Image (cartoon, rainbow, N blue to C red):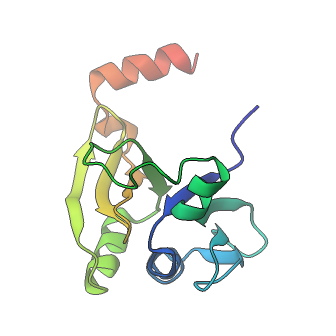
Amino acid sequence: MPPIHTRLLVTDFPACFRFYRDILQLRPTWGDEADRYASFTQEPGGEVVLALYSRQHMAEVVGASSLPADNPIQDKNVLIVSVPDLDGMVSRLQQQGVAFVKEPADFPDWGCRCAYLRDPDGNLIELNGDLAADQWSDSLRKAAEKWNA
C-alpha cells in the first residue's frame, strides 16, 4: 500500500502554514493558519502532497503528550520538493528572506542538483532538480542501467 502524502507535526502551526502557503507557494485544500490541521496541493484540484498538524494534538491522540517535545537529534526526515528551476527558486526564496542550510550544489551520484532549507519548525526540506544524464557519475549510470533494464 503506497503512502498517500506526508503530514508534518509542527509546534508553530501558524508560521508553518504561512511558510508552505506563502513561501513554497503550495495551495491550501483544507484549513488555515488558525486551525491545527491543514492540507496542501501543488496545483488547483491536484492531489494533496503535504499536510500539517499540531504536534501537541497528535501527541495527545497517540498518548505521548507526557514525553519531551524536543530532543537534540540529527534530522530523521527530509521533505523532498522537485522544482523545474532550482537556482531560480533559490534566488526567489532568498529574496524573501529564506536562509539555506546548503546552497545549490550538484550531486552527480544522485543525478540531481539540490539545496536545503528549514521550515519555521526546523523540518529539513530538499529542493531538487534533475541533472542531465551526461552529468551523472559513472556509478549512477551503471545503477540506472541495472534498475531501468
- The residue drawn where x is 34% and y is 73% is 88
In front of the other: 106 or 70? 70
* Residue 76 or residue 108, whichever sits in front: 76
Picture coordinates of residue 95, whole percent (x, y): 27, 85
- Locate the C terminus and report the quarter of the image it occupies: top right
Residue at the extreme front of the image, as rendered: 66
**x 38%, y 51%: residue:** 68
Answer left or right for 18 relative to 116. right
Residue 29 image position (x, y, % from top left): 73, 75
Q: Is residue 9 left or right of residue 109?
A: right
Residue 96 % position (x, y): 31, 86
Q: Quadrant of the N terminus?
A: top right
Where 128 falls versus 90 (above or below)? above
At x 40%, y 55%, the residue is: 69
Judge whether 127 appears above or below 35 on screen: above
Q: Is residue 88 left or right of residue 25?
A: left
Residue 141 coordinates in the image, percent (x, y):
38, 24
Residue pictured at 61% horizontal, 56% vertical: 60
Establish if 139 lies above or below 28: above
Locate residue 86: give its quadrant. bottom left
Q: How many marks?
A: 0
